[in-house]
Image: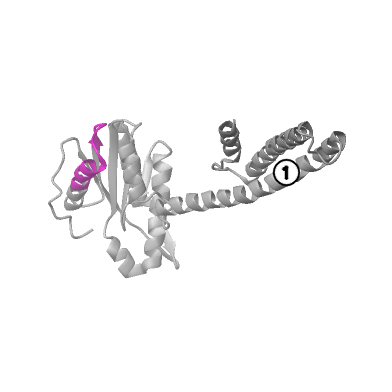
Amino acid sequence: MFRLTRDWVIRQLLFEEFGSYSEVVRKALWVGIKVSLFAYGLNICAHLLLYWFDLLPYSLSSALVIASMLTPPITFILATTAYVAVGFSIHELGVSRAEFEWLSRTDMLSGLPNRRAFLELFDQCNKEKSMLVFDIDHFKKVNDSYGHQAGDAVIAEVARILSAVFGEGCVCARIGGEEFAVFSGSIPFAEFVVLGEAARRKFADMRVSVDEREISITMSGGAARALPDQAFDETFSRADKALYAAKAGGRNRIVLSYSTEPVSANRTRCAAA
């Protein structure tokens, strides 16, 4: 009996993730009601036991009145207040943890997922996937000629165009300084490449205004397919090799890798990014 009672009390007082402060209050009120009724029942049983052994110093009716007047409200207030205080703290910790997790997986400049988040999402997708890696052509010249503020503005505009072109069916990320990547497990490879080409043309047409100066850029890309069991690294190496070929072939273009065979990573990237 004691063990059952203990387990019941523990279950009532267990804390969980709370979605809002109002959810904490609702849970606290319900727990307060159950705990006060439980305490009231124990109080009544204790008085009856004392009465049975003729140890009650006053009449049973007086004892029941006192128990009924004091035990439920006092227990309810104490249980509810304590639960609300702890529940609010747990909710705030959950919010802080969620914010920290978001910050750790998001590139602050572009607002896109970072490399870590992109890699995890890619490897979690157990379908056939398409990946496209983009790199801004001659980005160093943008920073050298216009300043890092202009470079930041270009990064932000590229991120906006990527998100707009590829939409919700794809995951867009900034995985390096001027390097972006997109993957999809729901769009056929041919259609995915068409979207990539549309994005490339939009990049070539975009103009970013900084201090009354207009900046234009181009992007090179490499696309690759991945089978369901192929991980990020081997797929990325093939897309990256295709990107290297796009750079070597004159930039402002997308090169496709139709192979699904892994590519050796022991090579040197094009130095003139």
Q: Position of residue 29 (x, y in %)?
A: 70, 40
Quadrant of the rendered image containing residue 263: top left
Residue 267 lies, in percent from the top left, at 13, 52
Which residue is at 37% across, 45% downward? 172
- Tell me where residue 14 appears, x and y as whole percent: 56, 40
* Residue 236 within the magenta-colored segment of the rendering: yes
Closer-to-camera residue (128/39): 39
Residue drawn at (40%, 54%) of the image: 107
Please, what is the three-letter code of the amino acid marked with disc 1?
A: Thr
For mark 1, what is the residue? 75
**Front one among 210 and 21:** 21
Q: Viewed as shown, does residue 38 lie left or right of 178?
A: right
Circle 1: element type: helix
Q: Where is residue 146 in the image (x, y as percent from the top left)?
A: 36, 68
Tell me the quarter of the image containing the C terminus. Answer: bottom left
Q: Residue at x 40, y 36 (%)?
A: 169
Q: In the rendered structure, which segment of residues is drawn in magenta?
A: 225-242
**What secondary structure characterizes most of the magenta part?**
helix
Residue 226 highlighted magenta (yes or no): yes
Q: In this view, does 3 lie to the left or right of 254?
A: right
